[in-house]
Image: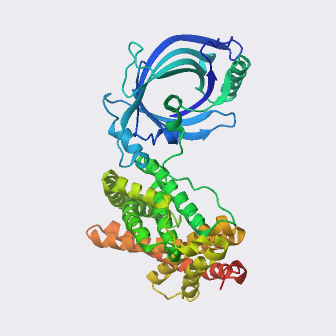
Amino acid sequence: MREEELKFGVHGKFVLPDLSGVAERVEPRGRQVLTAVYYDTADLRLARLGITLRHRTGEDGPPWHLKLPKGATAAGATVREEIAIDGPPDAPPLELSALVTAWVRTAQLVAVATLRTDRDRYLLRAGKKTLAELVDDTVEVSEGRGLLTDGSGVRTSFREIEVERKADGKKADKALTAAAAVLVEAGAAAGATTPKLVRALGRRATAPPDVPVAGEVNSFSSAADAIAFVLRRSARRLLDYDVRVRRGEPDAVHQARVCCRRLRSDLRTFGPLVDAEWAAPIDAELRWLAAALGGPRDAEVLRARLRSTADTDPLAPLDPAVVARIDSILADRQRRALKNLDAALSSDRYPALLDLLIETVRAPETVDLADQRAVWVLPAMVETVWDKLARKAGKLTLDDPDDTWHASRIRAKRARYASEAVAPVIGAPATRLAKACAEVQEVLGEHQDAAIAADEWRDIALAHSDDPELVITCGRLYERERAAVHASRNRFAPVWERTSRPKLTSWLPG
């Protein structure tokens, strides 16, 4: 569920202004007393990222809530995704604790604060439709699981007003804007975006996240700083994709695997500038994670390929029932692969990997040469990767084995990653080469997908030789895939000619 709300700071004696003009009708909904126990690590890893996990009583609906930040609107409203589920109050449900694995990792979730909120509620309505809800909260805070039943143990208190969107459309927009204007005119401080828990916990909750931020680099940065920037950026992306993978969001498994591959590729590209013993452990762990992500992704690609290849020639349609039987075989494979991935993500090895990754990118160990400016040092790193691609790709022939073409695809991907890695310090020349390599990678990727799919349809036919209709359909799929292989090979030469133009690589030292 998407949550969009405006927050306003007010003092204890603030008088709520007349709200009658902010909507067609303002309905007071009485008082609520809410008690929420918040969970985090001892060093507040979730709060420092704007994430809240709590158990709250005193209202209708599931008591457990996980809120994930999604940014802000142009009007300054905080946007978060809220996941609410049922569960006993003694500890966070596994479903929610799993979703914060990437940020908690090997640390433990503990109760860090209890907030008791006295809330006055008002609904901003148009006809029968609720446009927004305005709440006036007085909050008392205690540490840990203190229940505040008698007011003892209160460490701090504060008051705030929230206006939360409850509908889409222009009427809701106007209601939020009007409510904000009335509150500000009455003396409320607009622009507050800090969650209650963060405000309650103080400075520790506003400290920088334990996940190192990428920072900024430019043409004057050292190679060491550029390397740290690239590795931290990819590490953060991998952590952010964890929750998407667990929730089965489209393309999440693919993008997580890309993060693993990019990190490994960057470590290889910058190999002459980093300590080999420092890089080896995380490289091995990323290889393991990429393999776990690979099973579901490969099955996903094959299922999409089945549908597209079956529809290639509308004048010679394939039997939909037989295609569905083939898809069910792949679906079973995908389910098994996802089960294996879930086991990997639930293992002790995975959070330990993430801890290792964060420690690795927090302080990359580089050699003395990396202290020089990146623009002097990094082009030679890219040139090494580019030369490996150029030597082989320029000699590809239409009769070469599939594996030879696939090897050039891997080299094209590494050349693209290397160019993208140095683009923040090199600028447009590296970006242009990266785009050209991406075009090569796309053509060779289509070649590889078709070749793999052809082999798969052949293998499925051999495994189901007692099903003649399926065998015939797999044979037709095989022929179409091999035609796609040849088409990709014929497309390659002009693409490579454009990519290998000297002006695209003139910034490389060789």
Query: 151 or 35: which is nearer to us?
Result: 151
Image position, residue 276 (x, y; %): 44, 74
Which coloring applies here?
rainbow
Res. 59 in view: no
Image position, residue 454 (x, y; %): 42, 73
The residue nearer to you, when weighing 28 against 451, is 28
Q: Residue furthest front?
A: 368
Q: Is residue 430 visible?
A: yes
354 left or right, relative to 370: left
Asked whether, in this view, residue 393 is left or right of residue 291, the answer is right
Identified at 38% across, 28% down, the residue is: 144
Q: In the orientation shown, which residue stands out farthest toward the left? A: 466
Look at the picture and state if 40 lies above or below 58: below
Q: Quadrant of residue 182?
A: top right
In the rendering, at what x and y percent does residue 354 appear? 41, 55
| 11 sits to left or right of 49 | right
Task: Reply above or below: 464 against 248.
Answer: below
Q: Quadrant of residue 296?
A: bottom left
Residue at horizontal 29 percent and vertical 73 percent from the top: 462
Is 329 or 418 nearer to us in this picture? 418
User: In the displayed structure, would residue 215 be above or below residue 86?
Assistant: below
Above-or-below relation of 382 to 240:
below
What is the number of callouts on the image?
0
In which quarter of the view is residue 215 placed?
A: bottom right
**Quadrant location of the C terminus in the rendered image:** bottom right
The residue under the point 49% across, 22% down is 156
Residues 349 and 436: in front is 349
